[in-house]
Amino acid sequence: MSDMKALAHLMKELEDQLVVCMRCGMCQSVCPLYDQTGREADVARGKLALLDGLMHEMFKDPEGVYERLNKCLLCGSCAANCPSGVNVLEIFMKARAILTGYMDLPPAKKLVLRGMLAHPELFDRMAEWGARFQKVFTRPVNDVVGTSCARVISPLLGRRHFKNLAETPFHKMVPVLKTRPGKSGVRAAFYVGCLIDKIFPHIAQAVVDVLTYHEVGIVLPENQACCGIPAVSSGDMKTFRSLLEHNLNSFNPGEFDYLVTACATCTSTFKEVWPAMAEAAGNGDMGLLRRVERIAEKTMDINAFMVNIIGLAPPVRGVGGDTENPPEVITYHDPCHLKKALGVSVEPRAMIKANPRYQLKEMASSDWCCGMGGSFNLQYYGISSTIGRQKRDNIVATGCSSVATGCPACMLQIADALSRSGDRVAVRHPVEIYAEQLKRHEN
């Protein structure tokens, strides 16, 4: 074990949290994985029972427990609907940290997490090299969704339809920003996040455009690192601690009133995962804990920030959404990390409705997980794509020309499902829809 003190601390916390579960089985009705497999071991109750046994058997079968724990989307549906208030996600992350500390990471994960993700500048350079040569190995398949697939059979990509890396990542377009607030009187730090920086830089540009329009001062530090969720969800507390410290050193909470992100997962990680896991990662470093809490308190999803703090500009009528130009139908998918974790669902819809070019039409089960689940998609693509297919069917049933969602990971999953079915439905972020409307104000 790499750090017995930290692992023992996590074991005690885990034991205290496990006793809360009453084994009622309410989690079965909301678990997208159990919905597909029907296996008790795949639902939260089964995993919690397994962990309870683990606590008493003292690592009799750590590999088996680790495998079952990893087979989870970490969508939070079980926690959001648990009558006992069991914080399932926190329990799972602590259990993964214990087991990884006991067994160490698999070599491939260690290479990705500790060899690349833990070094932001190296990660950036590797992504830039990947962007230069990706067209040699991929070909476009859907111009509306904007997806490609592998030119030849690839064990890594399989039959996936994916978004290519952007030719120019956002950190190259706008390396750093420090502007004063105007009439808003508010200054916001902007955490970009890996997927938006390297695949969806236009979403980051939309955030900057929206904040600038509303005269919000922007603090954009250079050389931002991953939020740490891939590391902590793999139980890699060493990499998590490294990324946590890097980001804490980059963002000084004394310089801004709020920290905004356009990624549901990054927002949830800053607000919930950092405080839950920082104590174990920091070995009781109270200074680090206080810094984490200050950042967590100031972190907001961009949609919630714009609607609840700044206020939206009124729609411009007469340009789209009128008799001659009827509005396009758009639907909205609720990311699990936004609605279930943070309770943000009204605000993204308000951002979309502020643009009269679009008519929002709700899909069935808009808050049912899309099946992405980060590394779950890589390890269990078959189940992931089956869940994604259900989401695709609900999207297409609305007759929409676009689907919006507030999480870039969900955008990737939905783009894959739509593209593989040959659908011509654009996948967008609510802040893009709102930024488009603001350009009409300027014109």
Image (tube, grey):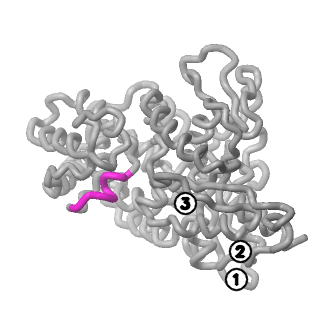
Residue 231's mark? Answer: none
Asked whether, in this view, residue 135 is left or right of residue 69, the answer is right
Q: Position of residue 199 (x, y in %)?
A: 68, 42
Q: For mark 2, give the secondary structure.
A: strand
Placement of 366 over or under 441, stated as above or below = above
Residue 217's mark? Answer: 2
Q: Nearer the viewer, mark 2 or mark 3?
A: 2
Q: Quadrant of the C terminus?
A: bottom right
Q: Identify the residue at the far right of this view.
A: 443
Q: Position of residue 263 (x, y in %)?
A: 57, 55
Placement of 389 over or under 303, stated as above or below = above
Q: Is residue 53 magenta?
A: no
The amino acid pointed to by label 1 is Ser
Q: Position of residue 376 (x, y in %)?
A: 43, 35
Q: Residues within 10 Å of mark 1 (few under 14, many from 20)?
A: some
Distance CA(mark 1)–CA(mark 3):
27 Å
Which residue in the protein does label 1 denote? 184
Which residue in the protein does label 3 denote? 249
Q: Residues within 10 Å of mark 3 (few under 14, many from 20)?
A: few
Q: Are marks 2 and 1 in contact (CB under 8 Å)?
A: yes
Q: Is residue 349 visible?
A: yes
Q: For mark 3, give the secondary structure.
A: helix
Q: Which residues are magenta?
A: 76-83
The amino acid pointed to by label 3 is Asn
How many marks can you see?
Answer: 3
The amino acid pointed to by label 2 is Gly
Please identify the quarter of the rendering in which residue 361 is found. Answer: bottom right
Residue at figure coordinates x 65%, y 60% from the top left: 430
